[in-house]
Amino acid sequence: MKEVLFLVIAYLLGSLQSGVWIGQLFYKKDIRNFGSGNTGTTNTFRVLGKKAGTIVLFMDILKGTLATSLPIIFNLPLNPLWFGVAAILGHTFPIFGKFKGGKAVATSAGMLLAYSPLFFVYSASIFIILLYLTSMVSLTSMLSALLIATSTVLLPIFFPAILQQQDWLLTILAASITLFIIIRHRDNIKRIKNGTESRVPFGLNKSEKK
């Protein structure tokens, strides 16, 4: 019963809509009415700018980290990853936002940070490199998720210093989250194919936006 309670708490943490809060409190804008309509980090950057986007990025990562840390803090006999998944579901289907949220990339990163800080640094490096090469957050998110999921199998074999042991729950969840992220980006995939996907002012193919 205690474990169920904390899983609910993890979901509620994920449901906190930092992008909506920052927009309404400091910019008098509801980001759900602009851009893609999503409440996550990417749309916050697009609608409110770098400062707000950076704050929301850290807040969304923090949600995943706090949620995943709950069983460690309170000594619960469940794999911390389950609590991270609860936060991801909360971010994507928030009870505080009529179950319409973001795409959970930053919150997933927060889950990895709590689970394995070194693996988080490795994963973040993949994301930054791919973002530099593509200048598209959507494509970077999908490719990063795919590479990170693959890495959960390969790293314990070839580079155990980064990820020491094989955790099949991590692999299964990483593969599931990858599929989930791709599904959530299906509109972006269409725009990528049409050459109309938004680019960020960073990297080799950056936009001209200042």
Image (cartoon, rainbow, N blue to C red):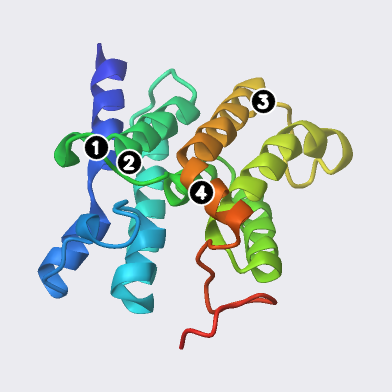
User: Above or below — where is 23 with respect to 50?
Assistant: above
Which residue in the structure is indicated by mark 1? 94
Q: Which of marks 3 and 4 is nearer the N terminus?
A: 4
User: Above or below — where is 41 with respect to 135?
Assistant: above
106 and 155: which is toward the camera: 106
Quadrant of res 99: top left
Check the image and name the residue furthest to the bottom: 210
Q: In this view, does 79 lie to the left or right of 5?
A: right
Disc number for residue 167? 3
Q: Is residue 162 left or right of residue 183?
A: right
Q: Which amino acid type is shown beneath numbered disc 3? A: Asp
Residue depicted at 80% across the width and 40% down the height: 160
Q: Which amino acid type is shown beneath numbered disc 2? A: His
Residue depicted at 36% across the width and 29% down the height: 86
Q: Where in the figure is residue 122, as x and y percent of width and height? A: 68, 54
Secondary-structure class at tag 1:
loop
Q: How far apart are marks 3 and 4 (CA)?
A: 17 Å
58 and 80: which is toward the camera: 58
Q: Which of marks 2 and 4 is nearer the N terminus?
A: 2
Q: Distance between the residues labelled 2 and 1?
A: 5 Å
> Are the residues flagged by discs 1 and 3 in contact, CB closer than 8 Å?
no
Disc number for residue 109? 4
Which residue in the structure is indicated by mark 2? 91
Q: Which amino acid type is shown beneath numbered disc 1? A: Pro
> Are the residues flagged by discs 2 and 1 in contact, CB closer than 8 Å?
yes
